Image (cartoon, helix red, strand yellow):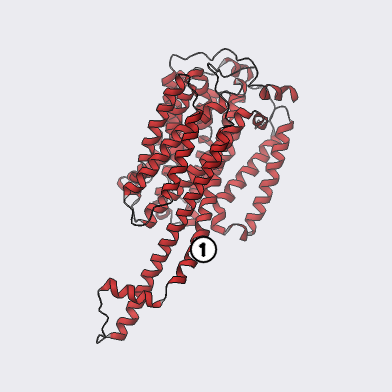
Amino acid sequence: MEAEAKPLAATASAPPAPAAPEHTHKWIIAVAVILCTILEVLDSSIVNVALPHMQGSFSATIDEVTWVVTTYLVAAGIMIPTTGWIAGQFGRKNYFLISITAFVISSAMCGAARTLDQMVAFRFLQGIAGAALQPLSQAILMETFPPNEQTLAMAVWGLGLMVAPIMGPTVGGYITDNWNWRWNFYINVPIGIGAAFMVSTFVHDPSYLQRLKGKGRADWLGIVCLVVSLGLGEIVMDRGDRSDWFAAPWVWYSSLIALVAFATLIVHEWRIPDPIVHVRILKNRNFAVPTVLLILMTFTAYGMTILNPIFLQELLGYTAWKAGLAMAPRGMGVMASMFLLGGIAKKGYDTRPLVIFGFFLIGFSAWMLGGLDLTMSMSNFIWPTVTQGIGMGLVFPNLSASALSSIPREQMGYAASLYSMTRNVGGSIGTSVLTTLLVRREQVNQSRLVEHVSPFSAWDLSRSSSGLPGAIHFNYMNELVTGQKQGLAMLYGSVQSQATMLSLNNIYRTLSIVMILAISLCFMLPRPRAGRAVEAH
C-alpha cells in the first residue's frame, strides 16, 4: 500500500516523463469526446422544461414525475466514481463505446416510453450509461494533447460542459413547444451514432492501459459502500426538501446509513491495494486544492442555475423560452474567456492570476444580482450573468488542467472520475442548500413584511387599482367586501413576490462571500512548470 501511495505523494518532485505523443487527429478526437460530453450534460437539463408535458402524458403528479430527473442523477452519481476502475478492467475505448451505445439505446427507449414506470427505468439506464462520458472524455483529452495545450483542451472541453446546461432549457423548450417532448430524447440518437463512429475510428488506448487491462481484483465492499452512500445521499439531497428534510423519518435513516457507508468507504479504499475509488490521490496537494476549488465553484454556479429561472419565470413572468434566452448570453462569456485562457496558457504564461480574477468576477456578478428588483429590465440581468460566464471560463479549464496534469498516467482515469464526482457533489449540495435556504428565507421575509400591512392597505390597493373614488356608492357594502377581498389577494401576491425577491438578494450576496473564500484558496494552487507533462511511473 505504501509503495503504491508513494508515487502519488511524490508526483510534484519526481522527474517528468517524456511528453505524451501528439496525435495527428487530436481535434477530431476532441470533437468526438466533447460531443459525447455535451450530449450527456444537455440531456440532464433539457428534460426539466418537458416535465409538465410528461406529467400530462403519464397522468402523474408533480412529485411522481420528478423521479424522471432524480433517477438519472442517482444512477450517474453512483457510476461516475467507478469509471476509472471499469476502464482499467475492460479498456477505456471499449468502455467509452459501450457507454455511448447504451446511452443512445436508452435515449430511444425513453422517447418511446408509454408509462411513468418505463420512463423511470429507462432514465436510470441512461444515467448509468452517461456517467462515464464526462470523466473518460476528460482523461482522453489530457492524453491526446501535448502538455502545453492541455489547458486549451480543457477550455474547449469545459466550453461544452458549461454551455450545455444553458442550452438545455432553451433547446428543450423549443423542441417541446414545436414538436413533442419525446424528441428531446430522440435527438440523441443520430448525434450519438456519429460520435461513436468517430471514437471507434480515431481513439485508441495507450500502451500502459492495454498492459493493465483485466488486472486487479473486484472491490465488492467498496462497490456496495459506494452505491449505498452516493445513492442514498443523492436521493436525500434531491428529495429531502419535499419532505421538509429531517422532519421526515426516512431522511434521518437514509442520511445515517449514507454517512456510515461513506465513512466505511473512505477507510476501506484508503487501506486496500486495488481500490475502486483511489482516495489516496487526494494526498497530492496539486490535485486536492483544485478539487476543493471546483466544489466551491459548482456549488455557486449550479445553485445560481437553479435560482435564475425561479427569478425570471416566477417573479418577472418570463416564459421558459424567454428565460432561456435571458440566460443564454452567459454561454457567450464562457466561450470568450475559455478561448482567451487557452491561448494564454499555450504560450506558457502563469494563469493563476486569471483564476483569481475569474473567482472575483463570479463573486461580483452574484453581488450585482443581489441588487436587482422586480422592476428591472432584461439587460440588468444579462450583464451580471455574462460577467459570471467570463469568470467561470477563466476558472474551470485551469482547475481541470492543474488537477489532472499532476497525476501519473496510470492513475489518470481514476483521477478524472474522482474529479467528476466532486463536481457533481458540489452541484448537488449547492442545489439542495440554496433551494432550502430560499424557502426558509421566504418565510422569514414574508413574516416581516406582513407586519407593515393591514386590511386597510388591501382596501386602498383595490380602490386605487379599480379607479373607485372614496365617496359612498349606492352599492357600497358590496363594493367594500368585494374590493377588500380583491385587495387582500393582490396584497398577498405582492408580499410573496417581495419576500422571494429579498430572499434571492440575500442568497446571491451570500454566494459572493463564498467566492471570497475561493479566492483565498487560489494562492495554494501549484505554480505551472514549463513543459510539464502528464507523468508516468
**Is 102 positioned to the left or the right of 282 in the image?**
left
Amino acid at the residue labelled 1: Val
- Dividing the picture into quadrants, the one containing residue 156 is top left
Question: Which quadrant does the N terminus fall into?
Answer: top right
Residue 532 can be seen in this image: yes
Point out the image quarter for the C terminus.
Answer: top right
Where is residue 188 drawn, in percent x and y? 41, 35
Picture residue at 44% right of the left edge, 33% below the top: 393
Crowding at dot 1, Cα within 10 Å, few <14 / some 14-19 / many 20+, comes out as few
Q: Quadrant of residue 39?
A: top left
Q: Position of residue 272 (x, y in %)?
A: 73, 30
Residue 371: x and y in percent read 41, 52
Q: Is residue 152 shown above or below 364?
A: above
Instruction: For mark 1, give the secondary structure.
Output: helix
Q: Which residue is mark 1?
A: 444
Q: Residue at x 35, y 40 (%)?
A: 329
Q: Residue at x 40, y 50 (%)?
A: 309
